[in-house]
Amino acid sequence: MLGSKRQLSPGSADADGLPLRRRRLSITQAGIDQDRENDEVNNSNDLDQLIQGNLPMSRSILNYQPYTNGPIYNGAIYGNVQNNIQVSTFDGLQFLSQHAAMGAVHESNERYPPPLCHPGTREVVVGRVKGWHLEMNGTKKEIMWVHAPAGFGKTAVAGTVTEKLKAMKKELGFSPVGATFYFWRTSPERNSPARLIITLAYQLAQSTPELRPHIDAIVKSEPDVVKMALEIQLAKLIVEPFKSLPNLDTMPHRLVIIDGIDECINSDRESRLEKKYAEDQETVQIRVLNLLLRLQSHHLPLSFLILSRPEAWIKRHFESRLFRDLVEPLDLYEIGDHMNDVKQFVRAELSRIAASFGFEEADEEWPGEEELVYKSEGHIIYASTVIRHIDDPYGDPRELLEGIIHNSDQAISHSTPFSSLYELYRQIMRSCPERNRALMMEVLEDSMVFYQYYSVDDARSWVSGGDVRCAKALGVLDCLSGRLAGSGLRALRPLHAVLRTGNGDADVDVEGLFVHSSFEEFLTDPHLSLEFTTDLLKGEERMLSNMLDCMTSITLDPVGGKLDDHTQFALKNWWKIWANSLQMSPRSTAAHLQLIEKIIAIDLTTCVIHTYLSLNYSTGEESPLFPLFTYPELSDFFVESMQSDGPAVSLPSVQKVTSHAKSALDSTFTLLLQSTTLPAFSPDAIERMSWDCANYLNQVTAEANWRENKLIEALQAPGPKGIDLFKAIIQGEISQELRRHIYEFMEQEGNPILEAEDHPFQELVEPDSIRTGGDSGFDWESLAALIRGGGDREQ
């Protein structure tokens, strides 16, 4: 295990008096939660001992929490956070920052430059918010809710309020902005509240100097607070430190800004990867509101600015008895002169474009400028999208503007408040030459499927250089689809107004592909996008087929060699895409069997080994094979939702692919346990491989002749390079019957592994004592040498 050993509990005695506790692992959330709970307890105890000086500094005690698919806890998640803590210099706030979602902060590099209102626009609403926060009388409501539909610039308002208030720091004598958090639906650390309280607490410690020693002391005394429930974090990291201050009643109010609560869509830390364990977005958004309500109920010197779309459940909650007397609502749609804001924005941007293109009399009004303002209907997003569309180095901005103004359908444009925006999107799509549209739609579908599945952490293992940029992602997809290099980037070039596809130094992360979420919604709604509707299920199936084709050429020569990026992506993600597409879209028998035949044609053993080798370069929380073991039987993974006239598992191809998968798993784990040529695996990789193997063994031991399985035989005699994996498997969630079978065989054969004082069968030898881990001083390297050389044991 990584950093802690999973200990065995005493069980009932069998006929021979040996303790038995049959722990058949059911792949359920309860099983996963128990696994996580055990690891968290061990890690917390280790950290306490380290701070007290009872553990050596070299020991790693803060580890990732595996298989996190349950309630919200926090820890070293969404990244390769290294926690090398020295007792003498342990900084509580630095430790807190390592667990915060720093990308959600106003000044973060991830958000730079932060969206701001164009100069001279949104002045009324920004003034209203500033006046509300700085109001000194006792009648002020402590929560303001600014709401508007998509595209009305709520995030820009939040950013502008932040900038203007921070500019008043010298005048006021304190920092009026206490903390910010910007939710974002495509960012794993920003589309979940898992790090919300930690991030707010860290910022409050920076903006309110009086709080720093109190928050620092809490973290030093209880470092595992970062793994506690959000409600407990709220009390310990914010409420208690504030109430420790002697001058609480006279402290000036700090503003806490929470933007985009409607973008908070997951409570599950695996956000986009394991959707079936994620709570409903309505539930998690209400939970965030209730956390803020709980914080407000303590009457601390804090005000709260919350910005979101007016989703029905959010509106209903703000209007409920709990909130209605505490909240000042502000409808962004009704405040200010939107048409004048758009007019100022358009004039300034057209002047900038004219100057950059060298047009004479750059400050003069353009033909079509008034029509553009009129067609925007006061929507800044409409005007800004048009500006991006015409600001094209490959075209004439004046001709592009004329095309937008004169080629739209007036009947559609003014049927609903946002129809003009959607008509603009259609016009932009139609600007792509008709001969290229099929390719454009294919690349769009590929790109949307890609960022739905790729993992920020795992991507480090398959993208050269460590970053996942749009241009790099499109290159991976070109290779996977058999397109010419650069085809994807060229196909999406006409959509530069609505997509950030990357261009040299301006290349952006793949999560920032869409300039605005309304375009993604447009593409997936056939009533809005008409002939430009993206079919993500078709995209998943096409990508899955391409992945399987790509994997047919994989070999183990050279062992440990780094595979191409597109091959790495295929290896690590086809399991997830297969499972998800099966659940979402039942296939016809013919289409399904065609994909199964592709799996049968793959050297699956080699593919699984390469998948595990890639774990040495990644920090994801679960194995890529995780979806395979969420089914009671391997055959279920291959046939769920398959449309068939009879039982699908009885089809010859299904039986063949199931046998193929079993054989591959047997061979893979046997090779990992006994090979002398494979490279060494990292502790993280061993942790995840042992979890997979334990789950597979629980299926194996359900069969009548399981003792004859070659993987069972490999466990009875592991090679020198397989000892770490062997120990992790034996200490894992395998059945007690299997554990005892292996122990008895090794005892009969006189295996030197049993000579170690901390061998993994302690419960079977010492049923009355439960060992708590730690180094026994046994020389495992010497043991490996003994096994390698087949040396004699002392009798």
Image (tube, rainbow, N blue to C red):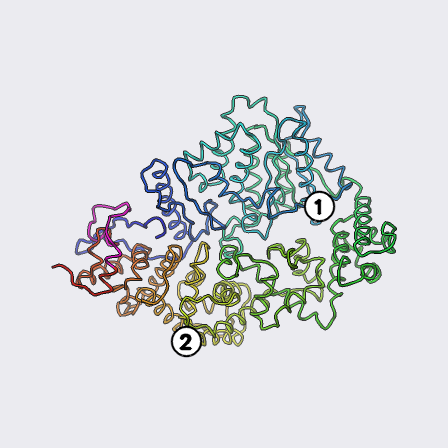
Q: Residues within 10 Å of mark 1 (few under 14, many from 20)?
A: some
Q: Secondary structure at mark 2?
A: helix
Q: Which mark is residue 153?
A: 1
Instruction: Give amino acid for label 1.
Output: Gly
Q: Is residue 290 above or below residue 787?
A: above
Give the magenta range.
760-783
| Residue in the picture at 78% in, 58% down | 390
Residue 540, given in percent of the width and then of the height, sits at 56, 66
From the image, state whether disc 2 or disc 1 is nearer to you.
Answer: 1
Work out whether 791 lies above or below 356: below
Q: Is residue 62 magenta?
A: no
Determine whether, in the image, residue 139 is placed left or right of residue 13.
right
Cβ atoms at labels 2 and 1 below 8 Å apart: no
Q: Horizontal placement of 68 versus 190: left or right?
A: left
Residue 772: in magenta span:
yes
Residue at coordinates 43% horizontally, 78% vertically from top-left? Answer: 652
> Which residue was labeled with disc 2?
656
